[in-house]
Image (spheres, rainbow, N blue to C red):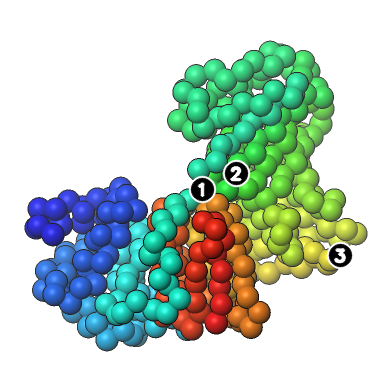
Amino acid sequence: MTSAHLQILWGKYAANTCTPEEENELMLWLSDPANELEAKELLSILYDQVSTREVPAAPLQPAAVLQAIRAGREPLIGRIFFLRHWGWAAAVAAVLVCLGGYFLLRTPVGKPAGMASMDSVHIMPAAGVTMLTLADGTQVPLDSLHNGMVAQQNGSSLMLNNGQLRYEEGAKGQHAGSFNTIATPKGQQFQIALPDGSKVWLNAGSSIRFPTAFAGNERRVEVSGEAYFEISQDVQRPFIVMLRKGDEVVVLGTKFNINAYDNESQVYTTLLEGSVRVHAGNEQKVLQPGQQSQSGSGSLKVVNVDSEKALAWKNAAFDFEDVTLAEAMRQIERWYDITVVIESGVPVDAPFYGQVSRKMSLNNLIRLFEKTDLKFRIENGNKLIISK
């Protein structure tokens, strides 16, 4: 790699504009011992840039970072992003995470057993189509449209602008009983501005059903999958999110995330700002910022959490912090067009840690697991098999 090309990649990485291929090229170069002196210089510059911001509690020196990488271990530098039981060193992430960057760093070792077939496939995040279903049943593929008006319904205008669908209400009361649905496929996210101005971000494999105008004394929507909300305050009309099995979240004006996928055992509501009341069965709880409700099997409990963790998906990252292998694989299934099969004997409940970019190919993501005792192979083009 020429010096000029390296500087271009480094600058693009710091600005978070690298393509997955460019990011992988840079990280493979960074992990090569032959590039140690030049890598130290780059890390020194980057460390100086972030040293006045949020950095690890203990001093972190670029030389120590690289030494730890070469030795295949993690230095003692406070909290870093890595996966428990994984031998690869993620020390550089302690520096780069200060810029909001997540990356894959491969140590210079031989190809692990079970990975031969992974090198022969190249699976990127799924590229399905986000679909809008109008009140009359007409389906509109949103990903293929240009900016401008998408449709008109009973006086409401639907405007698409840079990947966000915005509803502009006509005269109030015209659209009572008219509902639209927006559904995202695997590997896609979408943002909607509802008729009342509230904003919704849909995660992959999710849907929201809502009226083309909010009439009466409440604003009610239905959600499946995962969505983040920023609700326009209206004390006269509470905002109500209806979930599976009759669960509801009642809001006045706030920011919160709901995870209600059908293949998850519980519904998770995480509050960032404001206040919400969660109803599950015969129970109800009021959440404060930094709290999460967990409902399932007729129970409802509230725990304190890192609320930003719940929003990793919105920031284009996988968050494997304190999740099991089975939970991590469900996240991966929803982003890539694959089916994951975990064979008998694999410890599905072992906890993992870390955040990684959703931009990378499945091949590179799987390489995060290459220092475990697990083996991975692809069958039939889209089935990921995990075995011991």
Q: Earlier in the sequence, mark 3 or mark 1?
A: 1
Name the front one of labels 2 and 3: 2
Q: Amino acid at mark 3?
A: Gly
Q: Which residue is depicted at the point 68% across and 69% down?
A: 303
Secondary structure of the residue carrying tag 2 is loop
Q: Amino acid at mark 1?
A: Ala
Given contact means CB atoms under 8 Å apart, are the residues at marks 3 and 1 in contact?
A: no
Q: Which residue is depicted at the point 65% across and 46% down?
A: 206
Where in the figure is residue 214, as x and y percent of width and height?
A: 74, 28
Vertical position of residue 238 compared to residue 159: above or below: below
Residue 120, by quadrant, is: bottom left
Q: Is residue 80 left or right of residue 300?
A: left
Q: Earlier in the sequence, mark 1 or mark 2?
A: 1
Q: Residue 298 bears which disc, if any?
A: 3
Given contact means CB atoms under 8 Å apart, are the residues at marks 2 and 3 in contact?
A: no
Residue 83 in view here = no
Residue 204 in view here = yes
Q: CA distance from mark 3 to mark 1?
A: 34 Å
Secondary structure of the residue carrying tag 3 is loop
* Farthest residue, direction right: 282
Q: Is residue 11 left or right of residue 228?
A: left
Q: Earlier in the sequence, mark 2 or mark 3?
A: 2
Q: Which residue is depicted at the point 90% across and 59% down?
A: 282
For the C terminus, which image quadrant?
bottom right
Q: Residue 370 bears which disc, if any?
A: none
Q: CA distance from mark 1 to mark 2?
A: 8 Å
Q: Residue 185 bears which disc, if any?
A: 2
Q: Nearer the viewer, residue 153 or 105?
A: 105
Where in the figure is residue 68, as x and y percent of width and height?
A: 27, 83
Given contact means CB atoms under 8 Å apart, are the residues at marks 1 and 2 in contact?
A: yes
Q: CA distance from mark 2 to mark 3?
A: 29 Å
